[in-house]
Amino acid sequence: MTSTPVPRPSVPCLRVIAAVLATCCVALGLMLSPATTAKAHAAENCASPLQCVTFTSQSNGRTLDVQNGSTGDGAIIVTNSAPGYHQTWRLSVDSTDSSFNIVNNTTGKCIDLSWPALRQQTCKGQQSQKWYFQPVAGADKAFMIRNQSDNSCIDLIASANYNDAWTGKSNCHGAANQRWTTTTEAQNLAVDHAAKQCQKDTSSCTWAVKRTAAAAPLPKVCVSSVWYNNTSEPIAQGFSVTDMTGWSNTIGTHMSSALHAGSMPGVMAVVSSQLDFIQVWQGSKTVNNTVTVSVPPKQYGWVTLSVLAKKVTGTWTFDTHGLPWTAEDTITVPLKDDPTGGATMYVANTSPTFTSCV
C-alpha cells in the first residue's frame, strides 16, 4: 500500500498567509505594544528638556497619561503605571510670563481645565489651557501645576492608588495628591513666572539678605560704536553710549533681564534698601548718554564701561496666591562708588589698531 504525498503550499502562497496574519495581529494590537509606541514617540520628541516631559504623582507613583490611549478631544487625563499609552508631553512656553501649554507628544492635544476630570482638547491658546509651576515648600523637587485662569491645581482625585485614576482640579493645598515630579526645567519656569508677578506687584515678593561680597569692578564692556579718524588732525568725537544698569542675578530669566533692563524699580529698591552701601548706579544717564573722546589722526576710538558692583546673596520669598515658597539668589548690584575706594567709570580708548572692543 502506497501513501499519497501531501502537497506543500507554494512560496507565494506562504507570503500571502503571512501578510494576512500580520494584518490580523495589527488589528488585534499584537504587533505594536503601548510600550513600543511610547518609546517611538519619546525618541521623536526629546530634542530638548521641554519636549519630552513626564509628570509623576507623588501620591500614587503613576504617570500622567491619556485614558485608553485615546487621540480624540474630550479624553480624560489619568495616571497610569509606565509605559502606559501616551505619557510624554511637551511644554509650549509663553515667553512673556513662563506659563505653558501641556501638549501630548502623541495626540498633539492640550490638557484643558474641565469638571469633574481634566481632559485633552485641541490646543487653542485659551487661559484654561495655560499652566504654571509652583514649588511645594518643604518637598524636594515637587511642584504644583497651577492653572493660569483660576490658579487652581491639578490633583489626583480622591488620592486614588490604581491605574486609570482620574485627575481633576481643586484649590491648591500642596498635599501629596497635588505634588508632581517632572523636568529639571520646572524650577526655572517657576522662578520666571513668579518674577513676572513680582515685577507687576512687588508686594508678592520679599528679599532677605544673607551675605554680601566686597565691592569690585566687573569686567569691562563695550558701550559705544567704534570710530576711525581718517584725517591728519585729532578730532574730539562724541560717542553715544548704551544705557546699561549692570544689574543681574543667578535665578530666572525674567528676573535677571528685568533687573538688568531697569524695568523693576520696586524690586531694585527692595534689594538696595538692605545694602550697607546704597549709592546704586542707575546707568549712563550720569554722563547724558554721550562721552567725548579726542581721537588722534589715523586711530580708532571707542568707549568701555567699568562697573563697580557688589554681589549680594539672599532669599526671595514669592507669595502671589498663598502657599509661599523661597528661592536662593545672588544679585549683582552696580554701585556708583564705594567708601573704600573705586567707582563706576567710562573709559575713553584710542589705538592705531583695533582687534577687540575690550
Image (cartoon, rainbow, N blue to C red):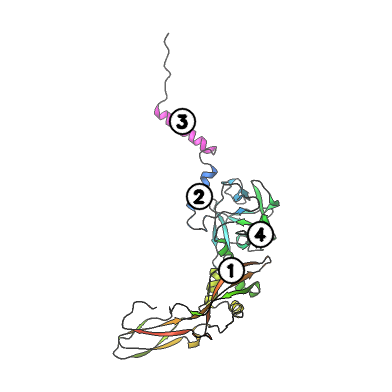
Crowding at mark 4 (Cα within 10 Å: few <14, some 14-19, many 20+): many
Can you say whether 253 is above or below 344 in the image?
A: above
Locate the N terminus and report the quarter of the image it occupies.
top left
Numbered circle sitting on residue 328: 1
Give the camera-side residue of 63 and 164.
Answer: 63
Q: What's the residue type where badge 2 is placed?
A: His
Contact, mark 3 vs mark 2 (Cβ under 8 Å): no
Q: Nearer the viewer, mark 1 or mark 4?
A: 1
Observer-nearest of 167 and 316: 316
Q: Which residue lies furthest to the left in this view?
A: 232
Residue 63 on the magenta span? no
Label disc, if present, on residue 41 of the rendered structure: 2
Q: How crowded is mark 1: few (under 14 residues within 10 Å), some or many (20 or more)?
A: some
Q: Earlier in the sequence, mark 3 or mark 2?
A: 3
CA–CA distance between discs 3 and 1?
A: 66 Å
To which residue does mark 3 refer? 17
What is the C-alpha distance between the residues marked 1 and 4? Answer: 24 Å
Q: Report how far apart the C-alphas of labels 2 and 1 lie in the structure.
A: 37 Å
Disc 3 vs disc 1: Cβ atoms closer than 8 Å? Answer: no
Q: How far apart are marks 3 and 2 (CA)?
A: 31 Å
Residue 319: image quadrant is: bottom right
Dot 3: element: helix
* x 50%, y 87%: residue: 286
Q: Is residue 350 above or below residue 190?
A: below
**Residue type, mark 3 in image:** Ile
